[in-house]
Amino acid sequence: MKLSYILHLADDALVLGHRMSEWCGHGPVLEQDIAMTNTALDLLGRARTLYQYAADLYNQMPVEQRAKMFSSVSLQKLDAAGEKAEEDTMPYLRDSWDFKNVLIAEQPNGDWAQSVARSLFVDCFYYYYFDQLQHCTDATIAAVAEKSLKEVTYHLKWSSEWVIRLGDGTDESHEKMQTAINELWSYTGEMFEEADYETSLRDELKLPELAAIKAKWQKHIEEVLEDATMKLPTATWMQKGGKNGMHSEHLGYVLAELQFMQRVYPSMQW
Amino acid sequence: MYSAEQLKVYSLLADVKDPEVPVLSILDLGIVRNVEISDQGGKQNVHVYITPTYSGCPAMDAIAIGIRMALTGRGFGSIQVTHQLQPAWTTDWMTEEGKRKLKEYGIAPPQRKSTEKLALFEEENIACPRCESTDTQLVSRYGPTSCKSLYKCNSCLEPFEHFKCH
């Protein structure tokens, strides 16, 4: 269960980081291209520490339990060969249904408005989430949260400012920003729904109460949208599934690019 | 409080530079948390703990290699380098000497303490490292590396980097 939870945190960071890295060389101006890729690097760094931890936990599991964790043939082969999992194993050798990132993280970049709207929703969640998670009873998770909190503070300021700038900008930028917020809105609910692995670990690890996080999240989003002269979407139906491995088709394309080299040339290194 | 062996390690670490800011040693930067020495059959094994400045800092791998290079061939046994995340690195750990070197190199050093409420946000009145003018403006909160932001001096019109308070 703990492995699933750590993978959920790691997959969120990796998949969103990968999406943001797709802006590299394509940003509207150099400074913002750098902002996107700086953030992508923070997310990748967070994912690396968590994947290392996940690999350690996986290696400590009894063989029978390991065999039931993932469906990936590559992982089963690794086990059959008696090899240990390492940092790269989890991101490169699992299949899409073994990924536990929230659906919003894998949504395509779209235009600039859609990318910053996605960042705002996710940054705001993790800002309040890590503030609580740094008191987690698991020392490694707490350390990642403490470290990441500082970084996500910058990310949230950046994404909030962009939503305000575009929303309170020209008619065209306002319309594009509002459209992006509306389109991504149905992907925000999943962040506040506990997966089974979170429920079972909540007391033991002192995990954040998602209902309390949601209240703070909602307040910040409302404030940003008000400053941006925009409307909070009213739709209540929410997408879900990512935390349990049910993804949109977009994740498959992300993984096809991300995993290609390791799949074609197993164990290759740069 | 340090043993002779620890002091020897620290003096060698003073030559390991941050590859992104090559005027700073890793001691100036404040990323060395601890040096442990353990005796194994007469050989002194060294264990160095370093803290990443930012989670994804690509310099960390280069720094770990730099530490190994600096300690190799100095009569130690095994050399181990561990990344330690907690407590999280802060610019408060940068030495005054380090801040002076940064300024000489043309990078405005962090001014605030990280415990101050607005620590993580951009500072006002950043002095231009070239002409000392505080008539400067933020160009971008993100710079060529995670730890720096971009500024422009309105007096001498030179662009410069600022090492963010973190």
Image (tube, coloured by chain):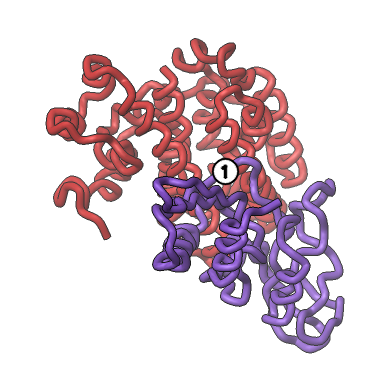
Q: Quadrant of the C terminus of chain A?
A: bottom left
Please provide percent x and percent y for residue A156. Answer: 65, 45
Q: Amino acid at mark 1?
A: Leu
The total of numbered circles placed on residues is 1
Give x and y (percent) for residue B139. 69, 70
Question: Image quadrant of residue B4?
Answer: bottom right
Does residue A1 lie above or below A105 as drawn?
above
Q: Colour of chain B?
A: purple
Q: Provide the residue designation for mark 1.
A: B85
Q: Which chain is red?
A: A
Q: Quadrant of the N terminus of chain A?
A: top left
User: Residue, x 75% and y 71% (percent of image)?
Assistant: B97
Quadrant of residue A248 within the rendered picture: top left
Residue A95, compared with residue B49, is above or below; it is above
User: Of A243 and B57, which appears nearest the observer?
Assistant: B57
Is residue A212 at least partly visible in the picture? Answer: yes
The structure residue drawn at horizontal position 35% and vertical position 31%, both measured from the top left corner, is: A99
From the top left corner, tell me how far across and down residue B106 is, in percent: 69, 81
Left or right placement of residue A260 versus residue A221 in this view = left
| Residue A25 visible in image | no
Would residue B24 be found to the left or right of residue A87 on screen? right
Is B160 displayed left or right of B125 in the figure? left
